[in-house]
Amino acid sequence: MSIEFKLPELGENITSGDIVKVLVHEGQEIRPNESAFELETDKAVVEIPARDGGTVVKIHVGEGQKVNVGQVLLTIEPAEAETSAEPAAPAAAPAAPSEPRLSGSGKHTEPAVSAPSGSRLGLGEKRDADETPGGPEPAAAHDDALIPAGPVARRTARELGVDLSQIAGSGPHGRITPEDVEHAAARRGSSPKTAPAGLPSGAGADIREPVTPPGRADHDAWGPVRRDRISQIRRTIAKHMSHSATTIPHVTNFDDADVTELDALRRGVPPGYLGPGIKLTMMPLVLRAVATALRQHPLVNASLDEENDEIVYKEYVNLGVAVDTPRGLVVPVLRGVDRMTIPEIAEAVGRLAEQARGAQFAIEDLRGGTFTVSNLGAVGGTYSTPIINHPEAALLLLGRSRRMPVARDDRIETRLMLPLSLSYDHRLVDGATAGRFLNQVIDLLESPGKLVLA
């Protein structure tokens, strides 16, 4: 009996997505929980595993197609040994198998390992091997679904013909990164994929792979053009930004922080002092200053509930960190930053960078922020007028630090200055409140002792 595999629930308020890549083909034998599609939805790219195993009889969707939750994606014919039953021997059916089997209805006799609604679908975390009761069976072949690797790492492994089970991951909790796959391919003589022109190879280069096909050639009245389909992420960003810009009356304050001493403190921390692989950049220090100041200025950490005509004061500090990726701007959220130490924030920021390289954000990782910090300085530029991440009340943008002549005690000195642009919702936050908040952030950045002891 054929089984129809439908797009499962992906999380709260997620009703559709775009098929980025079809990972199976008609006639292919697949195992239960083997990844069948890459799906782009709500600023995240996830792999969708097919719950049931068998032969792929028909693929109902194609790359670039928009699909809805509950829509049929595949038709699967279970293996003959699992679906056929001898009419003369009905008594054999009740026997308890040692492994999950498929009944004649195409359903498992015990629950399949699958990600729950809103979880990290397709991030290689359906169940880690060390979480499996009794550990892996020594005689069983490895199951790709249990290998801790994200969509990009798995795609890279397929392209290079690398067996993920033979790789020791260097990421958090043994996670296999795209770089691990490329290094394994290089050791055995494969040619790793080439980064796009103008981009560095190695770390971070793989996330610049286009999500959509190159587009189709066309002409307008003045010459040749190329047309690309608007991705789900770009549609989401456009809708969100338009809503924010037309709903929130934006005001932006500009200022500079003298981070000369703070930068000297940062550079004075020996490599590895905070922990293996943890690097102290300027971002964790800024996040610490922002979280501390938000506790003293709760209105900047609030949101406006227009429907109930209320101001919602958040008793927690969850900071969104804007990340620029080729798929679009994503804003993963660090939760409880006001309760974290600087080393803990630095470790969390490093983890974000790792997730950005592998496009390994879950839907829930992008929700629940109370304030956003964006780093334009990583790309270049000084000041900007950033659009607030609705329904938050404010957003702080960092420019590129540069050395400037500054008057200090009647002397001109060269100091390292960090440009700051604070956009805020003028319905909630007055100019004086925004000014006091930004002044406290600057004071903490200019006084490393206060920042460390806050």
Image (cartoon, rainbow, N blue to C red):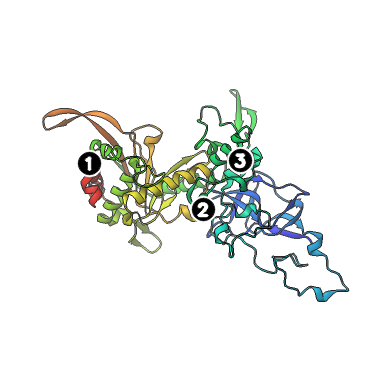
- Looking at the image, which residue is at 51% across and 53% down? 362
Instruction: For residue 145, say whether it is visible.
Output: yes
- Amino acid at dot 2: Ala
- Amino acid at dot 3: Thr
Q: What whole-number distance in Å separates the C-alpha atoms at marks 2 and 3? A: 20 Å
**What residue is pinned by disc 3?**
156
Give the numbered dot on residue 398.
Answer: none
Q: Quadrant of residue 182?
A: top right
> Could you say which is closer to the camera, residue 37 or residue 163?
163
Sort mark 3 into few (<14), some (14-19) or many (20+) by Cα contacts within 10 Å.
many
**What residue is pinned by disc 2?**
362
Instruction: For residue 428, say whether it is visible.
Output: no
Secondary element under disc 1, as helix, strand or loop, is helix
**What residue is pinned by disc 1?**
446
Secondary element under disc 2, as helix, strand or loop, is loop
Q: In this picture, is 378 found above or below 360? A: above
- Amino acid at dot 1: Glu
